[in-house]
Amino acid sequence: MRIAVALLGLWLAACTKAPAPQAEARETYSFPAEFEPHASIWLAWPRYENKAGKPTEPVLMGIIRALHGHVSVDVLAQDEAEARAIRDRFAREAVPSDHVKIHAVPHADIWLRDMGPIFVKTSGGGRAVVDYAFNSWGYPGFDRSSKAARIEDAVDRSVARLRGLPVVPSSLSSEGGDRESNGAGTLMLTERVERQRNPGLSREQIEAEFRRTLGARSFVWLPQGIVEDDATWEGPLPGGIYTPLTPGGHVDEFARFADARTILLGEVTEEEAREDTIRAMTRERLERARAAMEASVDQDGRPFRIVRVPMPEPLYDTMGPGDGVYETMKGMRYTSGVPFPKGEPVRIIVSTSYLNFLVTNGVVLVQVYFKEGRSPRVKEKDEAAQRILAEAFPGRKIVPIDAEAVNLGGGGVHCITQQEPAADPR
């Protein structure tokens, strides 16, 4: 979920229209859980390939196919010309699109979970969009005045304007991939992420803003994300392995609510931890997360039920000159002191997760990783994860998705989607 590649040719026309109205100060807000009913799922059409020859458009089309018959889809195109090209491609590749609307909204990247609209319900029975600050996942060198930054910062307000919804402004820097709601007033977050995005703010100050903007009443603070999601600018992992523009520990890679009192938590077994250093480090962090969950209670003072989900078998790939991710990595400032080998390929760990799923009306989209030639353990884990999710979400169809082209950019299915909750009946 990664830093946007510079897009110098983009224009700001759609971002300079009349601003969306601000929400009434007297309103209060609530943040629905993702497992509640949805009006739509939002996507943004890709701007580049993470790895040359592995386009991400087929992943989006797979998602659109899987959502057909379940929920509407809204897609952001760069302009009307691209919108027409997308419609033509849907027709050529037999992608069902009677449930899809395409909007001309400039965007620099596909990660709508993070910089896209955060829909909330209002105390007056309506809906609104919370506009958090976006600082490109806290990566060093972020320039809020740059064209790409201004484009990304305007996406959520542009969507609010399309829907005719008021905007709730917030100066807090926060991404949707690090906020899990149980729909009843409890929010689950990774402390290291939220504090890194907002240096100088205490945990209590961050909580106060989430109380105001999301109606949160209780918080589950998890210490740190998984190692495979560590921020790329921190330098290589053990073995000289790089992460592919990852955000530094988003909760949606390893812990999700299945219902108001059930948390799905990733698991690395003791046996797996003995196999390599990265998995051992991730196991230690996941067990600390488990301890934090067990020490927490929901908004009504009740403990949580924790269900473990296997972490996928590690997948590795190579990035080199000409790959979108590599071209961004080579220009970054690294804090580890280890120089980036510019001009030479680097080995990366792919951002795999069964917990980066999308749950919506009647269906759960889960990433799977088995392909011919890979270890049978990959297939076994794919199947185990699907069984667990089927039990966690009874009555919903489990749909496997090959999202590896997106995983190569540091995120997954959940990272590139954004749910719009259904409006309350009047």
Image (tube, grey):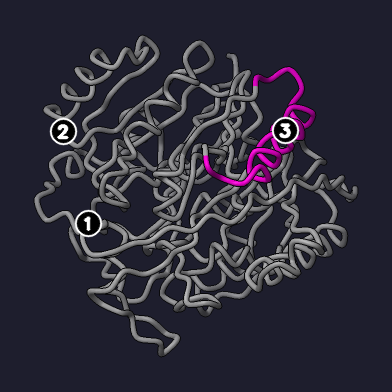
| Residue 155 screen position, x and y as percent | 31, 44
Of the pair 23 and 192, the residue shown nearer to us? 192
Query: Position of 92 compared to 11: left or right?
Result: right
At label 2, which amino acid type do we have? Asp
Magenta stretch, residue numbers:
373-397
Front position in the image: 323 or 304:
323
Label 3 neighbour load within 10 Å: few <14, some 14-19, many 20+: many
Q: Give the amino acid at mark 3.
A: Leu
Q: Is residue 62 magenta?
A: no
Q: Give the amino acid at mark 1.
A: Ala
Image depth: mark 1 or mark 3 in front: 3
Disc 2 crowd, CA 10 A, few/some/many (<14, 14-19, 20+): some
Q: Position of residue 303 (x, y in %)?
A: 89, 50
Q: CA distance from mark 3 to mark 2?
A: 38 Å
- What residue does disc 2 label? 79
Could you tell which of marks 2 and 1 lies nearer the N-terminus? 2
Residue to which mark 3 is pinned: 389
- The residue that disc 1 covers is 148
Dot 3 or dot 2, earlier in sequence: 2
Majority secondary structure in the magenta region = helix
Q: In this image, 391 relative to 250: left or right? A: right
Residue lying at 53% horizontally and 77% vertically, measured from the top left = 239
Residue 35: quadrant of the picture: top right
Residue plotted at (75% across, 54% down): 267
Q: Residue furthest front?
A: 373
